[in-house]
Image: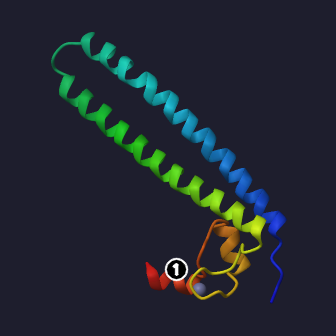
Amino acid sequence: MTTIETDEFRKLLEAERTRLLDAVAFLERENAGSLVEERGELTGRGDNNHLADMATATYDRELDEGLGDGAQYTLDEIEAALRRIEDGSYGVCEVCGKPIGAERLSAIPWARLCIDDARRLR
Ligand SMILES: [Zn+2]
């Protein structure tokens, strides 16, 4: 079996974690300010654009929240992967116990399953 270079994946995971934390912090700042901002804009205009503006604002907020949830989920997975590196179980499929291919780990460093099990369980 090929030994997986965990240091490399740790760096990948930590870089991705930093990127996601930045993204989440950015979204939280945006969302905190957006309600006030939108209301101010709406009151300043005529009636014609109200519905369209509100629809757009709601749509934007839903998109942001969706991204936030996805980021939080990935952050949890990254934390779990970093713990697996610490305890030496990183890169092993949780279902069949075989090593997860390095190629797959490069694409998804927090992968818990080998490509075969990931496909089967999808
Ligand atoms: Zn497997």
* Residue occupying the point 71% across, 61% down: 82
Label 1 near ligand 1 (CB < 8 Å):
yes
Residue 120 left/right relative to 62: right
User: Residue 57, percent across and down?
Assistant: 32, 31
**Rendered-image quadrant of the C terminus:** bottom left
Q: Residue 81's quadrant in the figure?
A: bottom right
**Total count of labels:** 1
- 38 up-or-down from 102: above or below: above
How many residues crowd around disc 1 within 10 Å: few (fewer than 14), some, or many (20 or more)? few
* Residue occupying the point 66% across, 75% down: 104
- 95 up-or-down from 68: above or below: below
Residue 13 left/right relative to 120: right
Residue 92 left/right relative to 72: right
User: Residue 94, percent across and down?
Assistant: 60, 80
Secondary structure under tag 1 reads helix
Amino acid type of the residue tagged 1 in the rendering: Ala
Q: Residue 8's quadrant in the figure?
A: bottom right
Nearest the eye: 14 or 81: 81
**Rendered-image quadrant of the N terminus:** bottom right
User: Residue 2, percent across and down?
Assistant: 82, 85
Q: Residue 6's quadrant in the figure?
A: bottom right
The residue that disc 1 covers is 118
| Residue found farthest to the front | 87
User: Residue 34, percent across and down?
Assistant: 40, 24
- 65 up-or-down from 6: above or below: above
* Residue occupying the point 76% across, 69% down: 87
